[in-house]
Image (cartoon, helix red, strand yellow):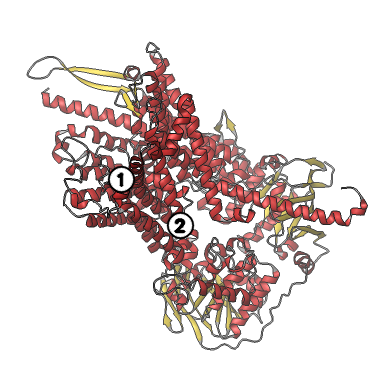
Amino acid sequence: MSADTMQVIQQFLLLLQYTLIFSSVLMMVALGGCFSEHSGVINLGLEGIMVIGALGGALVMRYLPADASGLVMVLLVMLGAVVFGLVYSALLGVASINFKADQTIVGTALNMLGVAGATVLVKAINTASNPDNPSSIIEYGLPRQNFLVTFKIPVSVEGGGAERFLSFEFNWFLVVAIVMLVAAYIVLYKTRFGLRLMACGEHPQAAASVGINVLKMRWSGVLISGVYGGLGGICYIMAAVSQWEFERGVAGFGFLSLAVMIFGQWKPSRIALAALLFGLLRALSNVGTGFAALQALNIPGGVYNMMPYVICLVVLAFTSKKSRAPKAEGIPYDKGMR
Amino acid sequence: MDAPYAIEMLGITKRFPGIIANDNITLQLRHGEIHALLGENGAGKSTLMSVLFGLYRPEEGVIKKDGVPVQINDPNDANALGIGMVHQHFKLVECFSVLDNIILGVEPTKGGFLQKDAARKKVMQLSENYGLAVDPDALIEDITVGMQQRTEILKMLYRDNEILIFDEPTAVLTPQEIDELMVIMKNLAREGKSILFISHKLAEIMAVADRCTVLRKGKYIGTVETKSSSMEELSAMMVGRNVNFHVEKKPARPGETVLDIQHMSVASRQHKKDAVHDVSLQVRRGEIVCIAGIDGNGQSEFVYGLSGLEPLKDGKIFLDGKDLSRSAIRQRSILGMSHIPEDRHKHGLVLDYSLEDNLVLQRYFEPEFTNKAGFLRRDNIRTYAERLIEDYDVRSGQGPVTAARSMSGGNQQKAIIAREIDKDPELLIAVQPTRGLDVGAIEFVHKKLVEQRDAGKAVLLISLELDEVMDVPDRILVMYEGEIVGELDPKKTTQEELGLYMAGAKRDEVRA
Amino acid sequence: MKNLLKRKGVQSLIASLLCIVLGLLLGYVVLLFINPAGAGQAILAVIRNFLNVSKANLQLKNLGNTLVKTAPLLMCSLSVLFAYKVGLFNIGVAGQYVVGAAAGLYAALQWGWGWLPCLLLAIALGAVSGAIVGMLKAYQNVNEVISGIMLNWITLYTANMILSGVTEQASPYTLHLRGNADQAILPSLGLGNLFNKHQYVTIAVPLAIILAIVVLVVLDKTRFGYELRATGNNKNAAKYAGMAEKRNIILTLMIGGALAAMGGALLYLTDFEQWSVGLSSVPGMGFNGIAAAFLGGLNPIGAIFSSYFIQHITAGGAFVDKSMYASQISDLISSIIIYLCGFVLFIKYAINTGLLRSEERALLRKQKAAAGGNTEKGGAS
């Protein structure tokens, strides 16, 4: 194998690695949005939920002793993200379900509150342990290794020299994402809960008339979106780096997931495909410059970054008239005065 | 079980902020009977049913099942007691299948997973037993209204409900479907189900019900055996006085043609067929022409096409000889078309605007109300509104500045009529102008239409109410499936003949 | 008192004040939670903002800083509330603000344009951005919130790409206008001198306030405003009355886009801040504009005060004791306030229900009193 060939393969592996992990993030968060919307609540606060979920997971990694076993670490980190995401999404639930607040305002507020809250908290923690460190960074280089399986394939390169490796990082979050996808599909289409949930997003009065507690179902939808969003958040910040600066938020992944959900027409299987496509585009913006062919095209990373939004906008422009969006989403449910 | 009544509602009182919706109401439903609940809009029928269904909790009163007092706190309780209801607006999830809709809320499951096969068997069995043909796998959005209603009935039967409530079930049906429903209801009663039939259509009540309870303005008026009663008696109980069924008017003296519609077609939003197909008609000065028909036969689309809310697919519209076929709504309005819309909340009013702002809705842009710089002339608007309020007796809390939302339905309609008539139109289009109004307001509206006719205007009335169709116009055109199928003289025809045309059982070749 | 409570304006004011008080209170609780020792001090620092410094000169300078950032925020909130009157939620305001900032900076630094053409270009492109959302809404029925969000990100990435041509060497920040494009800096007309020779206080501040008044007049007093509000309240009725619904939707979002973009230009053409092409998230100014619009009761005059208030506490965050708390505590407080703004409708509903209840009670009392008068001789109750 020539050195050039090897480089191309390595770049390709890297692209695959990023695509898979970004797709996992997008898919999980979009599925979260999907649950919330199927119950009738538009969740524009996914970005904020991701940040808080990420914070939950990162705090577990910061405080858990480094000698904790790998499996315990993995499970507790996920639990931390899930619990934080769940609790945070309750803010959306209270406002939009019980108080019939405007879901757009509340979602927007959650996005800002997520970043501000995480920043304030992490800075407080950092300054408390070291007054000279007023940063909003949490490091998790070592614990992160528990989530990874690194494959190193030795290759002999023409022209000799030391033995070189092709490397590929497998991330356990891929498995988590697939499990969460299958779970979403089964819950939505094969269970009583799913049937009732979707009835509440399509026609809450009909659901109420057969004795379904619409508010409870909507709460379930929102809380599940918190679980999925939180998982997506921790997965995202651990995707490629070993520390995270919480001031930066999650760089629009929550919004990108919204685009995935719309492009996936609120259906889990299509959401998975949409996530793959958008994940690839995001990966290209990160590592695409490594490809000679793409380099020659000289496309700035920003173009890849904006492509998902452009695609989504175009799709919306052509399909909005027969959109499969849940019919009652965004409309607060009023069960009448009691 | 030997108690004479399946359900009793005794002394029910339900208050909402500002109004008493049910004031000491009693309703007793016998086993195996069809019991009609009669009352005008706003009489308190819906509130009473919501109480029975546990959607509202009454301040006073008792509900008894088979003689035993029961507490109904939510629809689950009602369901547990065997009470089921077909709502006026179906409670069906459009993108679900018939089967999913039937089992929703009482899904057979194993470990939380749906078990649809058993459910399907039961549904098919029920559908056969009661002659309720449905396709369990069809999506609700793809099936007819009749089949949707059968799905609703199956929902109740699937739950083994013994007490079946039908809320205005015939409003959306064709005459054939109504007949079928009547048969189904009688079948159900024969099988021992107790049926509560909410309606304001006297003929249907007389045809199918054993007894009838009448409500008026939230109060209990009485319960009568239909066999020993008459439509006149029921109607008197319902409205509190004998209805003046006949509109006083002089014979029409039609002049030249004002509106000339030639071969008009309007595409449908729901399906591929035209909603309105090749309709030609004329309306002359000094006459009221009524387009009659059962709801959903293209009347709404016809009006949309005529007023410009929807584009024409084909054909021409002339007003006083001017071709308006492609003109904008505003243009048609300026050239003399006034339109009292079918739905006053959807089209007729901006509910959050004040009364005065609503009264200039068709004229705000005229120099009288807007100056050259584009600023509104508030003083003129106020003066104008005060005059209309005076002339048309529009009643409201705070006069011109009252929010339209806070006004009663009758006064909202009066405001719209004032606005449309005061524009001094050549052609007045009135679409179901008395829908949801009390008798006094209905009389007022009819009087105004006749006044316009006598003032030499052309009036086009679109109505679903047979009484109105027979009494108000000078000519009747019947619309069926988007076409004009007959022209009748209200003085010579009968309700029966009209009904045949409306149901599509009879049609003439109407001249183009 | 009750009649006063019935007025919509008064209800809005009460609701907004409630949001502010609760927001500050919750912020204080967070501070207590982090470090009880300095919490009171810190929350006061946030509230006092420029009053934290003792010298009058420095106070003026700090007030000037706050005002410089109030102008763009006010523009963004005007954009939001203008669209909201027509029933549209212009979440695209965040991207439109970026359009204005990028257009202004690029025209200034790359082409050497003067401030007025820069400002006009920003306004025009903002209008185009709004028009895209408007046309998608009018012709294809695309929800403006969703298309707005998509455009926010498209705009951000575009802005970063374009502006990377005019950055400082080996830095993600765009060049300073001062020294590189002096002609593009907004004139101060002596306003800076009022704020202790504040070089960044320019005509942007009065211009934004004038525009708030213009928006108020247009909405309340003109035929155009009458049409827009009618469309917002009931677009079917507006169509029925012959108003050009689609045109009005597009026009509204164009104006909204123009206002927000002008806000972006009004900040960056003062040279107060440099744009970083490394930005990975849409700047919060537009989202804060949503907050200001709702906190101001969706009234343009209210927006002037709410915009100032939000910038006031944001700037105040800089004065908290950094050894204990992060300056983002003020971001936290303002996002809590936005969150609470979601409850405004509920607060108003509660006020109205309360009023209705007390009226009913009064009525009942009257009836009872009347009945009691009649049965007085009967004795009991």
Q: Quadrant of residue B161?
A: top right
Residue at image coords 6%, 19%: A159
Q: Is residue A158 above or below residue B382?
A: above
Marks 2 and 1 belong to one chain: yes
Which residue carries the number 2 mark?
A: C85
* Nearer the observer, A194 or B189: A194
Horizontal relation, residue C374 to residue A2: left or right: right
Horizontal relation, residue B213 to residue A335: left or right: right
* Nearer the observer, B12 or B248: B12
Residue B502 seen in this snapshot: no
Q: Secondary structure at mark 2?
A: helix
- Identity of the residue furthest to the top in this view: A67
Q: Which mark is residue A199?
A: none
Which residue carries the number 1 mark?
A: C196
Q: Is residue B436 above or below residue A326?
A: below
Query: For the N terminus of chain B, which image quadrant?
Result: top right
Q: Position of residue C213 (x, y in %)?
A: 41, 59
Q: Position of residue A326 (x, y in %)?
A: 48, 46
Residue B143 seen in this snapshot: yes
Q: Residues within 10 Å of mark 2 (few under 14, many from 20)?
A: many
Q: Is residue B441 above or below residue A188?
A: below
**In terms of sequence position, does the residue under pointer 2 or pointer 1 come before the other?**
2
Residue type highlighted by circle 1? Asn
Q: Position of residue A18 (x, y in %)?
A: 28, 29
Which chain is disc 1 placed on? C
Residue type highlighted by circle 2? Lys
Q: Residues within 10 Å of mark 1 (few under 14, many from 20)?
A: some
Horizontal relation, residue B84 to residue C274: left or right: right
Residue at image coords 87%, 48%: C381
Q: Quadrant of residue B487?
A: bottom right
